[in-house]
Image: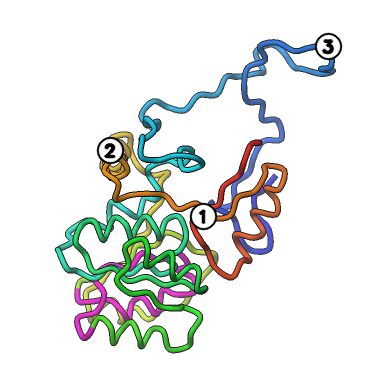
Amino acid sequence: MTLQNDGYQGRFFQSQTLQTSMPVGLHVESDNTASSFLTGPGLKRGRPRKEKTKPHCERVSGPRKGLRPLDSPAHPPLLHKIKKHDHVHGHGASGRVGIAACQIARAYGLKVLGTASTEEGQKIVLENGAHKVFNHKEANYIDKIKKSVGEKGVDVIIEMLANVNLSNDLNLLSHGGRVIVVGSRGTIEINPRDTMTKESSIKGVTLFSSTKEEFQQFAAALQAGMEIGWLRPVIGPQYLLEKATQAHENIIHSSGATGKMILLLN
């Protein structure tokens, strides 16, 4: 079974092949209505690794308790060699990763810009740390961002859809600026000279490549942000577990994100 449909691959940057037999859990007991339980060594107990679990924060309640404090691998490079009052732009900032990036950047004294395609999304971005927000569905929104930041340009761009926006990102960057690629659904043509003239860089990131030590380091920082209160997940659409298929369709084809999508177990 391959997790790929209509050209997109969900959260995976490569198509993932899964075994058709995936038993998870431990059969402890069953009543007389259970007709077929496998037993023996084929069943395995699942447990997350200790270094990837964190205690719940008392400031966080409801569905937010089920969200891990580490929202994306983009957040450590976001703060790398950053200076107070530098401009950070979240290209697609109304989703889970973008909202956390806005909150973190604002807490560190940065000038925060973001984009969203709906009025509700733009409102969420402003409420969660952005100084200014732009509609990336407008034809001239890039010109508006350039006018907002002036000749210097944007120092860091967190890019959620690189196959659409990367070329524009390179034109927005300051000298020595960088694009952090969090998401992409395909290919794009860029002009390498756009990186040469500004000595800018493109950095791709994935949580799966983090070492145990790296994960512990930046997870601790984000956990502290939740405890203090400047990092707070925003809950978006909620679906019952049996509607997971519809949730996957909506997250790809919706007009815009409005926080973290949640699957409810009951």
Secondary structure at badge 2 equals helix
Residue 261 lies, in percent from the top left, at 55, 52
- In this rendered view, identify the residue nearer to me: 4 or 125: 125
Secondary structure at badge 3 equals loop
Answer with left or right where residue 209 lies relative to residue 83.
right
Residue under the image location 51 percent in, 42 percent down: 63
Label 3 crowd (10 A; few <14 / some 14-19 / many >=20): few
Quick check: 15 above or below 38? below
Q: Amino acid at mark 2?
A: Ala
User: Of circles 3 and 1, which is in front?
Assistant: 3
Q: Which residue is mark 2?
A: 220
Answer whether residue 151 is magenta in the image: yes
Answer whether residue 241 is magenta in the image: no
> Mark 2 touching mark 1, by CB under 8 A?
no
Q: Which residue is mark 1?
A: 13
Quick check: 20 above or below 35? below
Q: CA distance from mark 3 to mark 1?
A: 44 Å
Q: Which residue is mark 3?
A: 32
Residue 53 lies, in percent from the top left, at 40, 31
Residue under the image location 67 percent in, 59 percent down: 249
- In this rendered view, identify the residue nearer to me: 160 or 56: 56
User: Of circles 2 and 1, which is in front?
Assistant: 2
- In this rendered view, identify the residue nearer to me: 26 or 32: 32
**Which quarter of the rendered picture does the C terminus lie within?**
top right
